[in-house]
Image: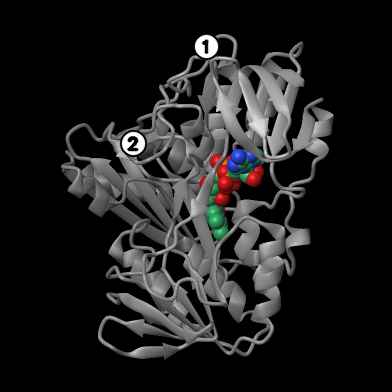
Amino acid sequence: MRSADVVVIGGSAAGIPAAVTARRHYPDKSILLIRREEKVLIPCGIPYIFGTVGSPEKNLIPDGVLEKNSIDLFVDEAKGLDPAKRVVTTAGGEEVGYDKLVLATGSEPLVPPIPGADLENVFVVKKEVPYLNQMLEVMKGVKDLVIIGGGFIGVEFADECKKGRDINVTVVEMLHHCLALAYDDDLCSQAEAILSEHGIDLMVDTKVEAIEGDGKVTGVRLADGKVLKADAVILGIGCKANTALAEAGGLEIGPTKGIKVDQHMRTSNEHIFACGDCAEKVSAFTGKPSPMKLASIASTEARIAGANLFSVHRENKGIIGVFATAFWNTTFGTAGLTQKEAEKNGFEVAIGSAEGPNRHPGGMPGMSPLKVKLVFNKNDGVLLGGQVAGADSGGELLNAISTFIQRKMTAEDIATFQLGTHPALTNSPIGYQLVNAAEIASMQMR
Ligand SMILES: Cc1cc2nc3c(=O)[nH]c(=O)nc-3n(C[C@H](O)[C@H](O)[C@H](O)COP(=O)(O)OP(=O)(O)OC[C@H]3O[C@@H](n4cnc5c(N)ncnc54)[C@H](O)[C@@H]3O)c2cc1C
């Protein structure tokens, strides 16, 4: 029987930082990471396999990080969990004892309950190298691709699958806009205009009724009876927490079907922690359960879990949700609440938007426009959310916005914060979008 002081199940965005953090905080402990796949994909890089990056093998997390941190690796699938004996059993018949266990078992793609979802050449987005290689092979012969789901995964696939292929791509989205859960309508419209401009057929407010075909997919039938021709379909409608092992061990499951955890990432068993897509989450704004799943959240939770294994050092204050996407050289980023989400949750809001070049003067080589929209709570002036669109520097600006949200900064704080600028790197101190957006919102709260 194998054993280690710390056993981590899962080798991705949560499992690796959980193990590395445990190593840093508890240098004397033995750490074993169990994962079921030989090679681990960079999950967020998966759409880029189909265009920019070119193959799953070029989108892998190297195992060097484990070796460097003296973390042992065991490739097998954990099937059973006995919390009383503190033992995990694997598909290969091994028993692995632990003192502390971290579940970082992630998520699985959702398959919609519609007829035809199991036809050949209908794909979900699995984080598995052999599956993605098979998908890539099929894509070589595809003429008509239908992507069901216009969230950031669907849109990134649309962009990447167009690259180097003579292919018709249609994105079908049941909401009123693509990316509607991440951005306000003005940014969604901007994103949709770019997608349409580059030849993506967008069908919003559109429900899929069935996927058609005889063995192999031939089309997608919509609620109005229209059939879209398709020789491949990608389902990008979200994912569900992988809780099988936790359930096998009798752990409590939360309201959004993730493994229930407290603010220290402890499950209902004091020796077992959970983090990442498999763990239940709570919104930092409302305290309500949240189904949001992101790699950035996974690694934050992992750093909390890894540090707290043998004594509590860190606390999870709830998720704010920060992420960006980029297509056709335009960045779209969001942190915290959008205006519509804030209003839906009962906040009275003040909004500030500012747009300008990301370098100064505007004639500087490489200049791109960048828009910033900030959402404040009108009652106390505190920043609730921010969105960026345009230049790629928006991706890092978003992380500054996220910091402001987490530090509960007000419009006044942001309008007067000390920033650094340079002609080749940013807008001028006069035109700096973040400050101007805060100033505009601040005027509404005087
Ligand atoms: C196409 C795509 C693009 C994305 N882009 C972004 C992005 O740009 N930014 C962002 O923040 N998020 C993005 N995400 C979300 C992000 O990928 C997930 O939030 C992240 O992968 C969660 O990490 P995780 O470690 O919790 O779970 P997972 O990545 O799902 O990993 C789970 C791990 O556990 C292992 N495992 C599971 N069960 C067992 C078992 N029983 N035994 C052994 N091993 C097991 C798996 O093999 C895997 O190693 C994207 C997701 C997808 C699908």
Question: Mark 2 near ligand 1 (CB under 8 Å)?
Answer: no
Quarter of the image with the C terminus is top left
**Residue type, numbered disc 2:** Ser
Q: Is residue 429 above or below residue 263?
A: below
Quarter of the image with the N terminus is top right
Give the color scheme: rainbow, by chain, secondary structure or one colour.
one colour
Q: Which mark is residue 382?
A: none
Q: Residue at x 43, y 20 (%)?
A: 268
Q: Is residue 64 above or below residue 149?
A: above
Q: Is residue 102 visible?
A: yes
Crowd tier of the residue under label 2, counting other residues whose Cα lies within 10 Å: few below 14, some 14–19, many 20 or above: some
Question: Residue 316, percent across and down?
Answer: 44, 25
Along the viewing direction, whichever of 278 and 21 lies nearer the viewer: 278
Whole-Å distance between the Cαs marked 2 and 1? 22 Å
Q: Residue at x 53, y 24 (%)?
A: 273
Question: Residue 134, percent across and down?
Answer: 69, 71
Question: Residue 208, percent across and down?
Answer: 34, 76
Q: Residue at x 66, y 87 (%)?
A: 141
Residue 443 location, quadrant: top left
Q: Secondary structure at mark 2?
A: loop
* First in sequence: mark 2 vs mark 1: 2
Q: Residue at x 83, y 30 (%)?
A: 68
Q: Secondary structure at mark 1?
A: loop
Residue hosting label 1: 312
Question: Residue 71, percent across and down?
Answer: 78, 27
**Residue type, numbered disc 1:** Val
Residue hosting label 2: 283
Along the viewing direction, whichever of 418 and 205 lies nearer the viewer: 205
Count of all numbered marks drawn on residues in the image: 2
Q: Is residue 359 visible?
A: no
Crowd tier of the residue under label 1, counting other residues whose Cα lies within 10 Å: few below 14, some 14–19, many 20 or above: few
In the shown orientation, is residue 134 left or right of residue 153? right
